[in-house]
Image (cartoon, helix red, strand yellow):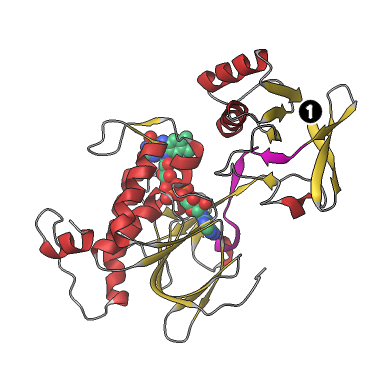
């Protein structure tokens, strides 16, 4: 649903998804002198590596014997800096419509409207959206006392924080908040964690010193007063209920990817992937490209290195639409003074 109807943002390129492949599209477009807008449903760039395996080692990036999801994201992000893309986070691309002049109008859930010469779908396995609490009415507190992503700011010392979840994000958030002086309860259905062994051991140590309370329970209701969330009603395994007073709730119970609206765009799909040609990774629609995990073609491999190749050819391919009639010569970043100027080096 659109909150408002703003003036369309006119752009040569819109990139859907700030995952590794979307970020590399931005970089390649930048080398070609094209500024891009980028939309991602997450509150940070990086897609799967940042969200699903930030601390895990990656061994198959050419020239990088080992990296991690977080380090690779940081490096890709830094690589886009010279080209200053406009990044719209925590928003989801919803609709696309053909415009009469062979351009595309793209709308987002938050109400942004883009008028684009080209669109790069780098949507991976879909928009990462958090699993939300199924407690009627509690959504009014989202972004204030209720968060589905860990906020940048920690609760003030002495504030009561309820963290929900059993993965790395939830356990680390509970540890950091407790060490920052908040009164932390970590809640999960049962006393077992998906978080890595190191974090789980750290959590255990803080539980033993009483710095974190663990509660095996599930939220079943809430209480508010004067527009503030006051408490959650939780059901314990033995059937009893408890009222947990809270200043903040961070429900970090995981993200699930949703292909959502993209599946309704009328693009040819095979097993939930967009069919592209391998010359320029264009879909069946002129000016709409699909790169990275979202696409399929004979021999497709869902690997970062393949996505980076696809991003490069798609960016070059799009120049025929962005700058028609202009011959795009291959230039090396090593030697081209034009590329050096664009890179600011
Ligand atoms: C545990 C694990 C380990 C892996 N290890 C390796 C490895 O060692 N080597 C390797 O090469 N690959 C590895 N991969 C695969 C690799 O992570 C993917 O190939 C890569 O992330 C694909 O990048 P992408 O940019 O296409 O998609 P993604 O990383 O999925 O990013 C897509 C982004 O698009 C956003 N998005 C989607 N739809 C919308 C929309 N409608 N509106 C707004 N935003 C949207 C999503 O929120 C997401 O941030 C691994 C994957 C996993 C899960």
Q: Is residue 19 left or right of residue 143?
A: left
- Across and down, in percent, residue 66 comes to 30, 31
SS state under label 1:
loop
Q: Which residues are magenta?
A: 246-262
Residue marked by disc 1: 217
| Residue name at image x 79 percent, y 32 percent | 218
| Residue name at image x 64 percent, y 37 percent | 156
Q: Residue furthest front?
A: 157
Q: Nearer the viewer, residue 201 or 285?
A: 201
Q: Residue 192 in magenta?
A: no
Q: Is residue 182 left or right of residue 225?
A: left
Which quadrant: the N terminus? Answer: bottom right
Disc 1: residue Cβ within 8 A of ligand 1's nearest atom: no
- Across and down, in percent, residue 306 comes to 32, 47
Whether residue 220 is visible to the viewer of this picture, yes or no, is: yes
Q: Residue 261 in magenta?
A: yes
Q: Is residue 21 left or right of residue 199?
A: left
């Amino acid at each position: 649903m659109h909150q408002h109807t703003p003036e369309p943002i006119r752009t040569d390129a819109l990139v859907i998804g700030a995952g590794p492949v979307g970020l590399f599209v931005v970089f390649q477009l930048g080398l070609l002198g094209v500024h891009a807008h980028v939309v991602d449903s997450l509150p940070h760039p990086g897609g799967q590596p940042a969200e699903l395996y930030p601390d895990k080692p990656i061994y198959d990036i050419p020239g990088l014997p080992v990296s991690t999801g977080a380090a690779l994201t940081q490096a890709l992000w830094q690589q886009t800096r010279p080209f200053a893309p406009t990044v719209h986070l925590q928003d989801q691309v919803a609709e696309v419509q053909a415009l009469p002049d062979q351009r595309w109008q793209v709308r987002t859930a938050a109400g942004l409207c883009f008028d684009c010469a080209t669109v790069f779908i780098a949507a991976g396995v879909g928009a990462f959206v958090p699993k939300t609490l199924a407690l009627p009415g509690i959504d009014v507190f989202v972004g204030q006392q209720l968060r589905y992503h860990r906020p940048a700011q920690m609760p003030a010392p002495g504030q009561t924080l309820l963290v929900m979840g059993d993965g790395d994000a939830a356990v680390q958030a509970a540890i950091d908040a407790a060490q920052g002086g908040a009164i932390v309860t970590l809640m999960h259905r049962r006393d077992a964690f998906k978080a890595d062994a190191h974090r789980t051991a750290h959590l255990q140590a803080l539980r033993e010193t009483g710095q974190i309370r663990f509660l095996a329970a599930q939220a079943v209701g809430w209480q508010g007063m004067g527009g503030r969330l006051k408490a959650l009603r939780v059901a314990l395994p033995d059937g009893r209920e408890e009222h947990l007073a809270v200043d903040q709730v961070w429900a970090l119970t995981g993200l699930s990817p949703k292909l959502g609206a993209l599946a309704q765009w009328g693009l040819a799909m095979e097993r939930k992937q967009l069919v592209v040609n391998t010359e320029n990774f264009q879909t069946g629609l002129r000016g709409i490209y699909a790169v990275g995990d979202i696409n399929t073609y004979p021999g497709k491999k869902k690997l970062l290195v393949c996505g980076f190749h696809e991003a490069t050819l798609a960016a070059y391919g799009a120049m025929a639409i962005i700058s028609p009639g202009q011959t795009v010569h291959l230039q090396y970043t090593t030697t081209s003074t034009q590329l050096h100027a664009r890179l600011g080096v």
